[in-house]
Amino acid sequence: MMGVLVASLAAELPVQAAPAAKAGFGFPDQKAARVTAERVYSTWRIGMVRKDETAWRSVTTKARQMKVRNLIVSQKGNFPHDFFHDQPEPPSLDKFAYIGSLTGCGNRTLASTYVGNVKLGEGKAAENAFVLLFVYEDGKWKFDQSRMFNLDSVPQVKERLHKGDLSVLVEQDGFHPYGAAPAVPAPCGRPQLIGKVFVDAPGRSIDMRINGVSVHQFEDERRADVISGGLKRGRNTISYTIKTNENLAHPAMAIGLFVMPETPGNKPVCVFDHILDATDTARGGEFTFEIRNENIASMNPRFTGTAPQPFHAVPLKKKPASTR
């Protein structure tokens, strides 16, 4: 029976609502979608809780497996041992109510949405949407990742979800399945220097590649990523495109690359930046920058030399003179 349900999702399915057809999504049989989503996610969750690598690999996409591997290796960790060490327990679906599912990519991707009260960090418990993302790969459904976001800021969306209005899943991109199956990244080597990229890009989309290996996408957000393969002493490269969404506010923007400390007490050092204010036009480009011995030395709080400046993609504006 379970095999029939999985196969029915992977096959071509009639679209049950016009809005979904226009957006390139479909509404699968909701009972079959729920059974599949919960079986795959529960297997993945049990694998995580029990630190069972075999179970985890059996239901995790190849792309996610390689991304996790690269993330750990890029921080000079050991995969898979460090992945399962001290991981928080993933949420159980027992705490959530099923809302509905959408398919995409010719019914090869699936997003299943749940709603429940969740306490994140030190904040109060709030009602959140919990969206599970799956890919049909090698003849079976695999889990890739989840999204969780607070519904308090979108009360009309929350109300429609509770009423079972599945058209809202099409209208809001947070509920969407992948438009294409995630590409499997190339395996990275162990880094010479651990690196992170920080981006604060409201109202902008940025596609980025660092040292030809580490690929990043930022969409109207503030986020820090580990650089796959890290950074290295000497020559490094970065290329990126920036697209501004004129329908969104796009104030100041910042991109920064940092070498991260490996010695206790040391601090990160910025080796590349691209900083703009709201009046500037954001343009991407290709840049080469050097990481020198003095960059690394300046990470030590006892460094007494002149602090080296990062490579500036655009000249920094001078601060206005004080009128006092």
Image: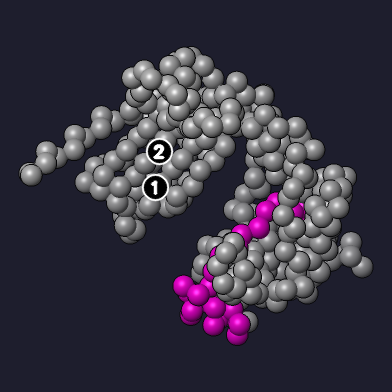
Q: Is residue 143 magenta?
A: yes
Amino acid type of the residue tagged 2 in the rendering: Ile
Residue 38 on the magenta span = no
Q: Which mark is residue 201?
A: 1
Residue 203 in view in this figure: yes
Give SS at disc 2: strand
Seen from this angle, which residue lies furthest front?
A: 302
Locate the C terminus by quadrant: top left
Please, what secondary structure does the residue beneath circle 1 have?
strand
Disc 1 residue type (three-letter) = Ala
Residue 231's spot in the image, x, y percent? Answer: 54, 24
Indicate whether 233 appears above or below 283: above
Residue 291 visible? The answer is no
Residue at the far left in the pictured view? 323
The image's mark for residue 255 is: 2
Q: Position of residue 8 (x, y in %)?
A: 80, 64
Q: Quick check: 226 left or right of 268?
A: right
- Range shown magenta: 138-163
Q: Circle 2: is it few (<14), some (14-19), or many (20+) Cα within 10 Å?
A: some
The residue lying at 40 percent from left, 38 percent from top is 255
Q: Nearer the viewer, residue 91 or 106?
A: 91
Q: Distance from label 1 to label 2 (Cα)?
A: 8 Å
Residue found 46% across the figure and 40% down from its top: 198
Tell me which label, 1 or 2, sits earlier in the chain.
Answer: 1
Q: Residue at x 51, y 16 (%)?
A: 233
Q: Quadrant of residue 322?
A: top left
